């Protein structure tokens, strides 16, 4: 199955009667065979972008190229794409086989033998060959989603579009289907664009991630780029589970004070340099970059509020200056609730943001 590139150039979308753009100046180049994930909170515009690529929504302005050909004004059926939705949208009165072959029959371009061969091929790829004679009501949620995927695969499109296809599944089935979709992409080597609000799906599945907010791209890059070098506070907070901790700090000559409290952090020269001369700053710390320690330079006094044992790791919630910080512990002594501790941030893993703009600060 061949694949093609997708180019989105300065897309804007304003719905009739709306006062703000649903999508604003959105540009993205998706390479052939690439798996790109659009991620963000509900209402950020990611599904609108996908629907514009599919031809289900027309952009207010901008251009869409698929395989180098302008498709901005083409009908969905002429774009050589297949879309898998959040709802499985299976015909309940049809068998799995009939659901998968329905679109091929409508096209009227294939013989019965060709249709059968494609259905069997897709069913074997997805592990549902033994279910071809069942009705959707006889299938689990994960099996129904496989049928929806099969219906798209039989068409052999050159671009797959996924609109939150795993949202209706339970946690275990979502994890399993993430793996299956990864295997499917590796096997088909087809261009795939995937929309989700689940940052775990984005991190584990995408070659590249597009993090969106209010119709705009906040950051584009591979998963670890967004995790280790978020371009702004929003990306830092959205990407990562548990999310990044944040402190608002007042910058003094030799120390940092947590705003709204009397908690003082004795800052190193490097930490003060990273404040870029601001009198207030936002500090972001990943839970794994806080360690329990005795009192010392840069140590943050805190009290243990909640402990969540997860087997291979333990999450510890510690209150400090009116803020709760999350600490990820592995193979370490776990403190008790109510215990007074000190948290030590790992300096070279700290993230500094401008409190006015939310943008990442790069020290010089």
Image (cartoon, helix red, strand yellow):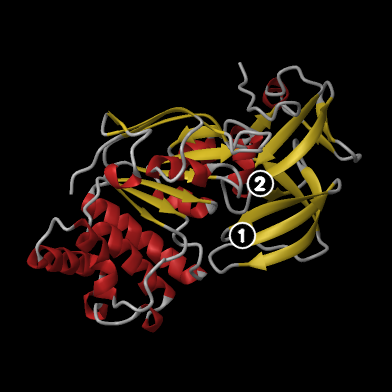
Q: Quadrant of residue 217?
A: top right
Q: Position of residue 323 (x, y in %)?
A: 81, 48
Q: Which residue, given by chain and number where applicable, does mark 2 sit on?
A: 290
Numbered label attached to residue 332: 1
- The residue located at (27%, 42%) in the rendering is 33
In this orientation, which residue lies closer to the viewer: 257 or 344? 257
Q: CA distance from mark 2 to mark 1?
A: 12 Å
Left or right: residue 333 versus residue 186 is right
Q: Please tell me which residue is depicted at 73% across the width and 57% down the height of the picture.
A: 317
- Percent position of residue 244, x then y: 65, 45
Residues 113 and 295: in front is 113
Check disc 2 and report its element: helix, strand or loop: strand
**Quarter of the image with the C terminus in it:** top right
Q: Say which residue appears at 62% left-offset and 55% top-offset.
A: 328
Q: Is residue 346 above or below residue 333?
A: above
Residue 206, given in percent of the width and then of the height, sits at 40, 46
Q: Residues within 10 Å of mark 1 (few under 14, many from 20)?
A: few
């Amino acid at each position: 199955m061949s694949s093609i590139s997708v180019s989105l150039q300065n897309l804007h979308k304003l719905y009739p009667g709306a006062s703000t753009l649903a999508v604003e100046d959105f540009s993205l180049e998706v390479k052939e065979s690439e798996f790109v994930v659009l991620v963000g909170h509900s209402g950020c515009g990611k599904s609108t972008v996908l629907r514009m690529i599919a031809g289900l929504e027309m952009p207010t302005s901008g251009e869409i190229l698929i395989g180098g050909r302008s498709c901005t004004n083409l009908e969905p059926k002429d774009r050589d794409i297949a879309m898998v939705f959040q709802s499985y949208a299976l015909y309940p009165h049809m068998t799995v086989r009939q659901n998968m072959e329905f679109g091929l029959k409508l096209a009227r371009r294939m013989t019965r033998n060709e249709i059968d061969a494609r259905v069997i091929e897709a069913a074997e790829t997805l592990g549902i060959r033994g279910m071809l004679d069942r009705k959707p009501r006889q299938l689990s949620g994960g099996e129904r989603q496989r049928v929806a995927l099969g219906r798209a695969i039989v068409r052999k499109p050159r671009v797959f579009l996924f609109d939150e296809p795993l949202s209706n599944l339970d946690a275990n089935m979502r994890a399993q289907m993430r793996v299956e979709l990864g295997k499917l992409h590796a096997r088909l080597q087809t261009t795939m664009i995937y929309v989700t609000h689940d940052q775990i799906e984005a991190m584990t599945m995408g070659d590249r991630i597009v993090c969106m907010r209010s119709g705009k791209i906040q950051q584009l890059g591979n998963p670890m780029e967004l995790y280790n070098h978020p371009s702004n506070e929003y990306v830092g907070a959205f990407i990562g589970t548990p999310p990044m901790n944040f402190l608002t700090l007042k910058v003094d000559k030799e120390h940092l004070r947590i705003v709204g409290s009397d908690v003082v952090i004795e800052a190193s020269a490097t930490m003060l340099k990273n404040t870029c001369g601001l009198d207030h700053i936002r500090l972001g710390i990943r839970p794994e970059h806080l360690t329990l320690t005795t009192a010392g330079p840069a140590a943050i006094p805190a009290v243990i509020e909640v402990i969540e044992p997860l087997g291979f790791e333990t999450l510890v919630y510690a209150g400090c200056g009116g803020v709760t910080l999350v600490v990820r512990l592995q193979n370490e002594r776990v403190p008790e609730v109510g215990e007074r501790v000190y948290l030590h941030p790992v300096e070279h893993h700290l993230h500094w943001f401008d409190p006015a703009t939310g943008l990442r600060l790069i020290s010089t």
